[in-house]
Image (tube, rainbow, N blue to C red):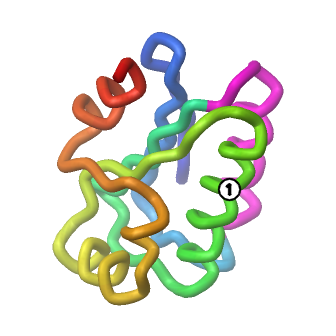
Amino acid sequence: MFELRRQGAIHVLTGDEPLHSETIGQLESHLTTCFSQGQPKIVVDLERIPLIDSAGLEWLVDAAEKCFQRGGQAQIAAPNALCSDILRITGVGEQVEIFDDVTSAVRSFSR
């Protein structure tokens, strides 16, 4: 299950399920909520996400692009070792900024 919370002006999307084709609908719903509340500034917290497949990777890149098109930004925080390797190997880590933890990712929006 995924949930969306706010930390000041930043939306933090957290969950404990894999980012894959079966969860994309839920993720898109949360993304739409972010878009309806002004300039999207989103942190996708991967700390408890066990795995990301190709659909999840595509969603991350698309979400970041959609945020950028609306004058915002999406970032990734706290990927575990496996997810970190997946992001690095696929090049997604070069397209979406990755932070060690949610606090650092949220703080980065103030620079």
Tell me where residue 79 sits by quadrant: bottom left
Residue 26 versus residue 57 in the image, above or below: above
Q: Residue at x 67, y 45 (%)?
A: 68
**Which residue bears the numbered disc 1?**
65
Residue 87 versus residue 33 in the image, above or below: below
Residue 19: percent from left, percent from top: 52, 70
Q: Is residue 90 magenta?
A: no
Q: Please tell me which residue lies in front, 73 or 60.
A: 73
Q: Amino acid at mark 1?
A: Glu
Residue 44 versus residue 87 in the image, above or below: above
Side of 90 relative to 20 (left or right): left
* Main secondary structure found in the magenta portion: helix
Q: Residue at x 26, y 72 (%)?
A: 84
Q: Please tell me which residue lies in front, 88 or 55.
A: 88
- Disc 1 secondary structure class: helix
Residues in magenta, as a range: 23-40
Side of 84 relative to 67 (left or right): left
Badge 1 density bin: few <14, some 14–19, many ≥20, Cα 10 Å = some
